[in-house]
Image: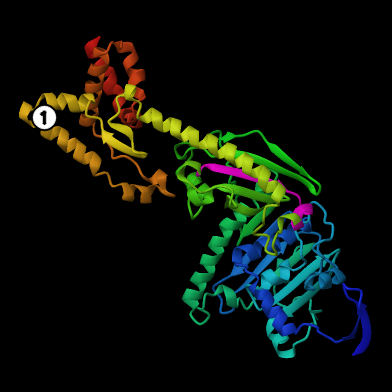
Amino acid sequence: MLPTSISSNSNKVLQTRKVDATPYASALIEGHRDFGYNLETALADIIDNSISANASEVKLVAETTSETPWLAIIDDGCGMTEHDLVEAMRLGAKNPTSMRTPRDLGRFGLGMKSASFSQCRCLTVMTRHRDALACAQWNLDRIARENDWTLELIDDPDPLGRSYLLASSGTVVFWDNLDRMMGGHADDPVKRTATLNSELSRAERHLRLVFHRFLEGNNPRLKLFLNGRRLTPIDPMAKDSTSGQWDPPDEIVLEQGVVKVRCRTLPHHKMVSKEQWNELGGPEGHLKSQGLYVYREDRLIIAGSWLGLAKQTELTKLCRISVDIPNTMDADWKIDVKKASAQLPPVVRERLKKVIERFVGTSKRTYQRRGQKLVDETRLPVWNRVLKDGHVIFRPNLEHPVFQTFSAQLPEELHIDFQRCLRLIGSSLPIETLHAELVGNAEAVVADAADKADLELLVRAIGEALTAGGASPESLSEIMQSHQLLRDNWAAAEPIIKEFIREIS
């Protein structure tokens, strides 16, 4: 121990001694396994390094059926010299405050190591740069035994028998001893394989979403493969859809760069295929996936959250806002090690709050106007929407021509009972059940199909009421198309309407 002195904040000179407080290798490196990574965020972090190395292809190869499963992430980037490899394997290789190039997706110099350790106990990196091959390994079991920070450099040209995976230039990251990926089924081959494949399936969607901007287009910046199968992008904004709506772009100019904001209303589920709709909503559905999509250098960081600026509601589930930030703003946004979360800087929060209020307000008014049209009395609705004591009530429209026509055929003493039956139907709407079904999965709730006889009765009753009110035969088809039930069954209803018009013409 060497004596020394320092000045405290009070300008008092303090007598101190220096002691070695180097972290215990085994304890610290085990702690790096618990930064909160899962398989999907771990793989994304490794792919970030490949993109920063100018890779045009990244291949994920997973051996899940053998007694010793392994996984490899292979890129065709620039590769590394042995010196560069040692630095890349060093924990904290880069200062997070250092300036980075626009293409650099890293930040802390921890990603490759912490991401890998979160899934495996043996990390081996093999790289080739200008025909020079280098290989290094961190083995957590060895570190636990020896408790030192010695990195193992491997001179064997094919230490794992997998050098065939390495291109003429590039890097392969090998994960062996996948203890965190087996779900506790290391001794059960069938369950172990099933668990590994299930984890990879979930990770696949995440990667297609996170890197979708890199994977898009006829000449993409990156091609991504999983066990030989090329992955296609999932664009959360559905840019390729002709439906939906974009708001004008907005920019927030700050000292550290420019934040680019773009609001998007997704197309209605009837305007896209069921497969595309489900893909856009993801496993949690559209209610949970609405909100902000934050990109850092085109890499998705946050996928669907209002970050406390708005509530998730059924009326806003098609609202998505892309927010693009440069990597010069990492400190301001508090980007975490996993690059899977961020916090809004105060000045951005205030601007986004105004953007969201305007955007969400427009979306709600659009839905409300559509709802009002569906119950417009001039369209002869089957249900009336009534406001009573601050509550919205739906009642059968007792004046509807179908009900009136049937009532007229009943003996007079049954009229009151018929109306009572209709009111009972209105009072018995399963509101709680409907609400539970609509939240997050509204598109799955549909009306029961109407048969031909039902449609004929409806067309005749409405047609007679309209003509009695002065509507011309030529206008009936257009007027009836605005009726929800007839519009939803237009293929069957249209010939019935044409036949009715011929009869009265």
12, above or below 401, in the image? below
Name which residue lies at 59% across and 48% down: 309
Q: Tell me if I can see residue 411 in this picture.
A: no
The residue wearing badge 1 is 415
Question: Total marks drawn?
Answer: 1
What are the residue bounds of the magenta stretch?
Answer: 317-331
Q: Is residue 70 magenta?
A: no
Residue 219 position, x and y percent, is: 70, 44
Q: What is the crowding at mark 1: few (fewer than 14 residues within 10 Å), some, or many (at least 20)?
A: some
Residue 355 position, x and y percent, is: 63, 39
Residue 250 placement, left or right of 396: right
273, above or below 473, in the image? below
**Displayed quadrant of residue 502:** top left
Residue 326 placement, left or right of 481: right
Name which residue lies at 92% across and 88% down: 2
Is the N terminus in the top left, top right, bottom left or bottom right quadrant? bottom right
> Considering depth in this image, is 400 or 44 the residue closer to the camera?
400
**Displayed quadrant of residue 457:** top left
> Considering depth in this image, is 192 or 284 the residue closer to the camera?
284
Q: Secondary structure at mark 1?
A: helix
345, above or below 362, in the image? below
Q: Is residue 324 magenta?
A: yes
Name which residue lies at 22% across and 29% down: 398
Amino acid type, label 1: His
Residue 333 position, x and y percent, is: 71, 55
Name which residue lies at 34% across and 47% down: 434
> Considering depth in this image, is 290 or 146 the residue closer to the camera?
290
> Considering depth in this image, is 435 or 56 the residue closer to the camera?
435
